[in-house]
Image (spheres, rainbow, N blue to C red):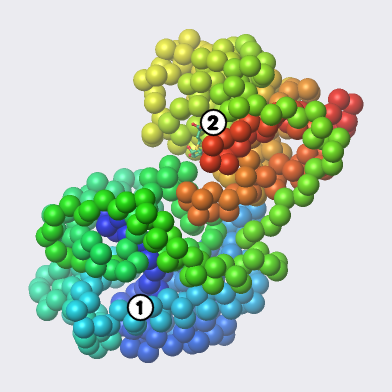
Amino acid sequence: MAYNLRRHLNFSTAYPFDWWITPTRGLIALLEAFDVERLYDTRLLARDWQDTSVRSIDYGVWLHHEFPREWSQPGQPVAENFRDLTERPRRRTEHLVHRFRAMDRPGERILFVREVPSEDRGRDGTADAAALADALRARFAQAEFVLLVVNGRLSGTAPGVIGVEIPEADGGDWRGDVEAWGNCLARLGIRLAPGLHPTAASRDLDAQEAANRCDDENGAAPALQCAAGEREAMSEPRRRTAAEKLAYIDSLRADWIRELEPWSTGPDAIFVNARLPPPHLLERCRFVSHRYELVDRHLPKGGRIAEVGSMHGTFAKWLLESARPRELHIVDRGFKVFDHAHFQPAIEAGQVVLREGDSSTILKSYPPEFFDWIYIDADHSYEGVRRDIAAAVGCVKSGGFLVFNDYCCFSHRELLPYGVMRAVNEFAIDHNWRFEFFAWQEQGHFDVALRAVPGSMPA
Ligand SMILES: C[S@@+](CC[C@H](N)C(=O)[O-])C[C@H]1O[C@@H](n2cnc3c(N)ncnc32)[C@H](O)[C@@H]1O
């Protein structure tokens, strides 16, 4: 839901409920007291039966995405010691609650959107919606608001409440049915008034989608996210100029630094420096202008190669054209957005093979010495890259290349830490793989190509 609101309103700022799952009673109790201490009271927190989320027993609220998860463990459970880790989410919630309360100002017009959780959907939701609107009214005495209740099965009306039904996405996509959301919000005339909210922002959500990540997968609780808006038929929002966008970024910086400060050091630090490879692993490395040149002029032609993580197939097109591989195996966990039409003839000729599923699992299915080189550009988290490296080493030829896209430590477009540089450097240092090529990229998302130092032990 939050994803679709941000997308529709071209807006991103934070309020406390985003990413939580809140049964109506607990939500109302929270709104009444907003007792953050009690919400994070460790005696009143429990992991759910699948261990993937933490629930406040008191409020019945799932604090989804609030605690680190063990991404390398089966089922990716919430960290066992989550009770020792309440300080950070509690502080963030306090900060967000403060902002939430501050919205109650004369002249402020707020859209609250409540997507009713499945456990509340079995019955008529009119009374719940009315009670929630009352709780909001008590909390927001000065501002005006509308409460949009999504999938709440409302048989009657309640003051200030609008009910809508939006179908779930096929296959349970966490983003929901993007088109249905867009149509519904547009039909209701919901837009953010330009300049109305001081922190309204333009944001490249497609980039986020493009990287095919949700915060759930990355395990990071989003620091500043959420939804607020306006119900108002208005002309198209004015496009922001580059200067306005930069001014907006400036206005966010103080918040950003304050949010990140507790995450910069200590065992949970999200920015961890990559180890520096020793000179003998770097001194032969050649600098090339771009990954296109790397493939075109430096990597072996005609071999059996793989692209791990392909999305639309944009770079795979270049691999096919420029590397002229005997076989190109394209691995991705989904091919919905992939340009099938382009590759169809090569697929039919057996030159291109599509493999759908988790990258490291699929790489492990290949025999040793199978690929001449492998291009890795799938999961960019540290753990994800480590898994792909371990699996790729098992099927690349001795003397073959492992090539890594996005060799950096942070994506400024997604505001997301990348673990590629750290994982690659550790691998190179620990297993004696040498940097052969470094390909420049205009936004700092470099490529590197590594090869085992001849005579070194297999990784
Ligand atoms: C950045 S895109 C790849 C872009 C492509 N290499 C290019 O340069 O045109 C990353 C892709 O990796 C895929 N991906 C991410 N994590 C994955 C995983 N664990 N297993 C398989 N595919 C994954 C995503 O679905 C997405 O399509």
The x, y position of residue 358, in whole percent, is 55, 39
Image quadrant containing the C terminus: top right
User: Type of residue at label 2?
Assistant: Val
Res 246 → quadrant: bottom left
Residue situated furthest front in the rendering: 243
- Residue under numbered circle 2: 331
Q: Viewed as shown, does residue 230 lie left or right of 120?
A: left
Query: Can you tell which mark lies on residue 89?
Result: none
In this view, the residue farthest toward the right is 455
Image point (14%, 64%), residue name: 232
The residue type indicated by label 1 comes to Phe
Give the residue drawn at x 50%, y 75%. 92
Residue designated by label 1: 100
Q: Give percent across and percent down for residue 134.
A: 21, 84
Say few, some or many: other residues with alpha carbon within 10 Å of mark 2 (under 14 / 14 to 19 / 20 or more): many
Mark 2 CB near ligand 1 (8 Å cut): yes
In the displayed structure, does residue 374 sit left or right of residue 187? right
